[in-house]
Image (cartoon, helix red, strand yellow):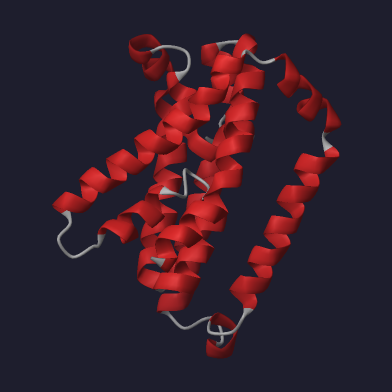
Amino acid sequence: MKGSLVIVSFFILGALAGLFNLIPCDFTHGRWSYYALAALMFFVGFSIGNDSKTLKNFRSLNPRIVLLPLVTVLGTLAGSALVSLLLSHRTLTDCLAVGSGFGYYSLSSIFITEYKGAELGTIALLSNIAREIITLLFAPLLVKYFGRLAPISAGGATTMDTTLPIIARFSGQNFVIVSIFHGFVVDLSVPFLVVLFCSI
């Protein structure tokens, strides 16, 4: 929860800095976001490749658990498509691109800003931060009413890092590896799906 509040605070500070022109224009309109994205992708790949223990633990998973990330992706895209019916000023592909962030706000919002502009990038950022915060706040209720896999699916790509502690607490330690596997797979899908829907 604290980490999410820190992220939201930085977002608010960035919005205020842009509003009051506290950052030089050449900095905000340059290629800095692309370089930040490239560095982010490198460190994500490095952290996954460097954790051999996690990769080995994937082998012990029940084969049916492989379906969980797939259900999360399909459910999120279906929900995004339904939302597009209510938003006449947004195309189906815009909504699908935003939904394809799966909570991975730092990566998806940069991609969407590059392809579709700052407005949709900001919507993606807020949407994906909201997904993480909802998972952190409502994990106990999700477990109570929908089962132990519900907060994992709700957390999307965040389930191998920021929402993992809350999932371990309310779903149980037995679901930690499931949560990491889920986050790992959904995480990998984000750049491919976001770029796909931004390009259509």
In this rendering, the answer to whether 35 lies above or below 10 is: below
In this rendering, the answer to whether 65 lies above or below 75 is: above
Residue placed farthest to the bottom in the image? 26
Total number of numbered labels?
A: 0
Nearest the camera: 108 or 17? Answer: 108
In this rendering, the answer to whether 113 lies above or below 76 is: below
Q: Position of residue 128 (x, y in %)?
A: 44, 47
User: In the image, 71: left or right of 43?
Assistant: left
At a point 42% along the width and 14% down the height, the residue shown is 143
- Looking at the rendered image, the quarter that the C terminus falls into is bottom left
At a point 76% along the width and 20% down the height, the residue shown is 57
At a point 39% along the width and 54% down the height, the residue shown is 98
At a point 53% along the width and 48% down the height, the residue shown is 104
Q: Position of residue 90 (x, y in %)?
A: 23, 62
Q: Position of residue 66 (x, y in %)?
A: 57, 24
Nearest the camera: 168 or 91? Answer: 91
Which image quarter: residue 158? top right
Q: Position of residue 38 (x, y in %)?
A: 69, 65
Residue 113 appearing in the image = yes
In this rendering, the answer to whether 96 lies above or below 168 is: below
Residue 13 appearing in the image = no
